[in-house]
Image (cartoon, helix red, strand yellow):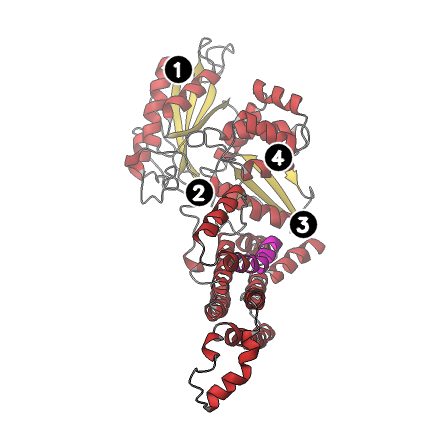
Amino acid sequence: MASDSSIERLAERLGIASGSRKIGRTTLIRLSIYYVVVLGIVAGFIILTDNFRALALPADGKSTLGELTQGFWDPLFRSLPPLTIGAAAVLGSFLLALPVAFTYVRTRNSLKYDQAVVQTVIMLPVVVTAILIVVANSLALAFSLAGIVAAVRFRNNLKDSRDAVYIFAAVGIGFAAGVGTLAIAAFLSVFFCVLELLLWKLDLTADHEHTFGLLCLPALPPGQRQGSLPFAGETSVAPVATREALEAASGDASVATPSADTGLLAMGGGKPEPGVTEPGEDGAKRPAERLLVYTTDPAKARQVAEAVLDQMAKGYKLKKTRNGGNAQFVLEYRLRTRRKSPADAIIHRLQAEGTPYIIAAEVVAADARDKS
Amino acid sequence: MANLVVPVSAHDHIRGPVNAPLTLVHYGDFQCPHCAAAYPEVAAIANELSDSLRLVFRHFPLAQVHPQAQRAAEAAEAAASQGRFWEMAPLLYENQEQLDDHSLGRYAKKAGVDLKRFKKELSSGVHAARVRADYLGGVRSGVGATPTFFINGKRYEGMFKSEAFVAALLNESRGGNR
């Protein structure tokens, strides 16, 4: 089946079908060879740039083997203009950023892959290095740079928070190269790539992930928050109604044990109200309706609902309390409305006064079957 | 595990083939930060599985904690009335810190919506009933928080990451027994 194969293909691409993430021997070999070559080049740059002062001939003219060697190379270093030193740093940061970008491409699945991040990781160290070389030790230039950066307003939403780490790594490499510590830049590049590949391969802490705390829930009073993982001060864990709460909500009726299969929790006889009649008993002028109150706390919701219904309804009777699943319960009332207070007005008031216990309320025809 | 009570119908916002073997129903709130984080993941999967996945969006604005969510949902409906729901939804999620009427107008314009008609519909509240119907449908299905997903009518309990979604969809396509 074509559709099935497309999901299979996608799962395969994401490494889901195989059940494990494979870095691949070829990838490791390529990275290793690349680093050996680049580190050789970087070592050359370090010798050419960082140590050139130490290679000057001694003033007393004593000649050792090392000094002779230094003397041999001395003209070359003396002739090195600042441009060459800067170019070596820029080129070094570029070469060290490439494996970081490669690691990003390798460890991001096709859905999370962001080409902009790859190009940024390659280009950013080059730019940062160049800027730092220009700024050097000048405080005035540093302030100028801050002014320019402040003037360039740039905002971008990264698809994955881990992408930010790549950006920081790129800045780090550029920074290290820019201040003349290519060895640090090289170490950062190698260590970052190894660490990232390992973390991706092992998929550390994945087993501990849960949607707990990753949901927005209706606000609940502080007393009802249980083991909450608040997010921006707006979330809490929905309370799970206890059997006692259900019993309280259902009055003196017997409460059945929740059934995970059917979702049916309780059949409760409510408090009959005078004037409530079954449909058709008092004529067909204003037939009874069914009021469904969705709540996380049936006991409190019942208090609120019945206080509202006492004032606004002609008559009502709690028929049953159902478990709607996911810590939600449904109070089912048989309802007779007044002309002055239509169902919409009752619902509006229930929601206004029932917050946060009442999630929603609706009125349906009394003979309509609840699909749930 | 709760199941989807309100079946997918022509009234829903559907992306993908109508007869797709896989259906992912998303109950979302445009002011919910977790929905905003989950939406790109879901949208990316919908792009990849354009021939086999039907993505359905339903409103579940949590007005108690997100005062602008209802308005944003109505704005999305106003865009939907001009066939621009799937252009509007990502804009709302990407800019959920600015969901005032003026900003909604800007997003609508960006989504290619006729602004005059959009503003008229938004100010009249003509789409409030539709949003409420989605909300009540969610409540009936046991939705109490956002984002909530259903895969082929069964509530999805996993993480809101593309790998987890794809794994669940794969499981469902293989018969849902694992």
Dot 4, crowdedness within 10 Å: few (<14), some or many (≥20)? many
Task: Give the image location of residue A349, x and y in percent.
Answer: 41, 19
The answer to whether the residue labelled 4 contacts the one labelled 2, judged by CB atoms less than 8 Å apart, is no
Numbered tag placed on residue A215 in the rendering: 2
Question: Which residue is disc 1 drawn over?
Answer: A315
What's the residue type where badge 4 is placed?
Met
Marks 2 and 3, how far apart in space?
A: 28 Å
Marks 4 and 3, how far apart in space?
A: 23 Å
Please say if B77 is above or below A32. Answer: above
Whether residue B47 appears in magenta in the rendering, the answer is no
Question: Which residue is disc 4 drawn over?
Answer: B88
What's the residue type where badge 1 is placed?
Gly
Task: Give the image location of residue B38, x and y in percent.
Answer: 52, 45
Which residue sits at x=37%, y=22%?
Answer: A353
Task: Give the image location of residue A210, x and y in percent.
Answer: 43, 52
- SS for dot 3: loop
Dot 3, crowdedness within 10 Å: few (<14), some or many (≥20)? many
What's the residue type where badge 3 is placed?
Ser
